[in-house]
Image (cartoon, grey):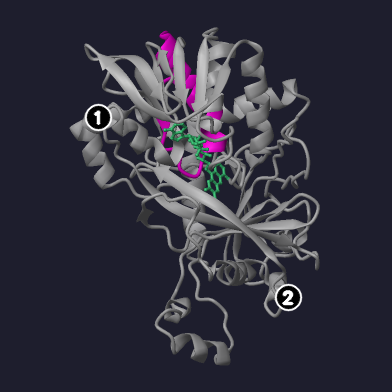
Amino acid sequence: MQADVVICGAGIAGVTAAYFLAVKQGITDVLLVDERPPLTLTSDKSTEAYRNWWPGPDGAMVALMNRSIDWLEQLADQSDNRFLLNRRGYVYATANPAQIENFKQQGETAVSQGAGPLRIHGGQPTDPPYQPLHGEGYHDQPNGADLLLDPALMQQHFPYLSPRTTAVLHARRCGWFSGQQLGAYLLEEARAVGVRFVEAKVTGVGVENGRVHQVQLNTSQTINTPIFVNAAGPLVNDVAGLLGLELPIFSELHIKMSFRDHLAMLPREAPLLIWEDAQTLPWSDEEREFLAADPETRWLLDPLPASVHCRPEGGDQILILWPYHAQPVDPVFPLPDDPFFPEVALRGMATMIPGLAAYFERLPPVYIDGGYYTKTVENRPLVGPLPLDGAYLIGALSGFGLMAACAAAELLAGHIAGGQLPAYAPAFVLSRYDDPAYQQQLAAWGGTGQL
Ligand SMILES: Cc1cc2nc3c(=O)[nH]c(=O)nc-3n(C[C@H](O)[C@H](O)[C@H](O)COP(=O)(O)OP(=O)(O)OC[C@H]3O[C@@H](n4cnc5c(N)ncnc54)[C@H](O)[C@@H]3O)c2cc1C
């Protein structure tokens, strides 16, 4: 077999890379290889949300996400919104008055980095108007963010939030879409111009005179190719190992649960909702005593981190995520079980949406899935060449792989095809770590924007 480009991995990264190479760059002799059916390891387990809200030390992530969202909007336009892109926003809320200054600072940073203007609503007659969200569609929506400090306005637009809420930051170029449908659409378009898919495991990459020249599969097939792309998601380091490389990445387990909101505690048109305060879970005295008695459960009485989040899904489901135990782990499949997750995540979410406490007594049947955030230390992706001629990488897409896929794949295709790259390209190449100044910057990086 022969191909101009072989891509290992048909998750959203590999599929979108194939699309940008074939449809946008005209490199159509592309072979996608995956040991699983396309989009079935991590890319169909996501919350499917997107945001251009990435305050950080520079504007590279905002620029990448703005570009990616431009593509999402364009692809939605051209496909009659087949993947149901919405623009409901992300709502970050707090009950801690000290967070208000933090929200303002994040907003000002985001403004300076190109995420759009910050509008503050403090209940003054001179305040700008607050434009409520639309449940469907993505056109004619505000950019930037609205910071709601006026209790009456918060109550009017988000009556289901805790009455203790003191501030709501509504980031607007954000929402969600069907990642599976986006991936299926891009794969169809790529296949229509010649991209091929083979179900097999990549077991070796042949290198001659410092150049990639072939790829070996577990089916005993060999593909002659000058270009190999590692898009292996959580297994990206295993595949890098086939080239004798080790990438500066690690993985965290992120679990998601869904259940039927049969009591209709969360309105169907709600945005993505994130509680920004650390919290101690609400237990009864009897439950406390019981949990404290067992070393296995005592941690449930400890303070747990911020960022429990949820959104409505489909006709009557709620998705809840809370990475309260995010630490580096080796990715294993099937995922390890966390028997506490449903109870803990529901209780954590009920701090933000007290109506959910109605499920404490009798938790409806839950469906659990999830996967790994495979990431770099500063939570930025790796997109570009590897230190071996003909080898490339699109990975470390952490918790933003769906939202970043289009811009990351466009960038990768630009590296492969040659030509001018966007200004943010250097922020995402592997070789950034060779720069001592960058290493110094990393030491004082601050927040990584992760949810
Ligand atoms: C719980 C959760 C919530 C998330 N929420 C969001 C969100 O709201 N928004 C967002 O943008 N992102 C989100 N993400 C992140 C997003 O899902 C990932 O960044 C993205 O799916 C990664 O895509 P990928 O193509 O790199 O990896 P994957 O989808 O895992 O694909 C990698 C593929 O490589 C294949 N492969 C690996 N090794 C080999 C080999 N040797 N040979 C052949 N094939 C191989 C695998 O079989 C797999 O199909 C979330 C992730 C999780 C886990």
In the rendered structure, are the residues bearing label 2 and label 1 in contact, judged by CB atoms less than 8 Å apart? no
Calculate the distance from the C-alpha at mark 2 to the C-alpha at mark 1: 54 Å
Q: In this view, does 94 lie to the left or right of 365?
A: left
Q: Which residue is identified by label 2?
A: 358
Residue at (31%, 23%) from the top-left corner?
A: 386
In the drawing, what numbered circle is on residue 244?
Answer: 1
Q: Residue 405: horizontal and vertical position, in percent?
A: 53, 30
Amino acid under disc 1: Gly
Q: Start and end of the magenta stretch?
A: 394-423
Q: Which element is circle 2 on?
A: helix
Q: In this view, does 326 lie above or below 298?
A: above
Residue 51: give x, y in percent of width and height.
57, 40
Residue 376 to residue 185: above or below: below
**Relative to the observer, which residue lies in front, 414 or 306?**
414
Q: Which comes before the other along the chain, label 2 or label 1?
A: 1
What's the residue type where badge 2 is placed? Ala
Q: In which quarter of the image is residue 398?
A: top left
Residue sitting at the far left: 436
Task: Tell whether 438 sits left or right of 428.
Answer: left
- Residue 352 x/y as whole percent: 62, 67
Give the residue displayed 71% in from the left and 27% down from the top. 76
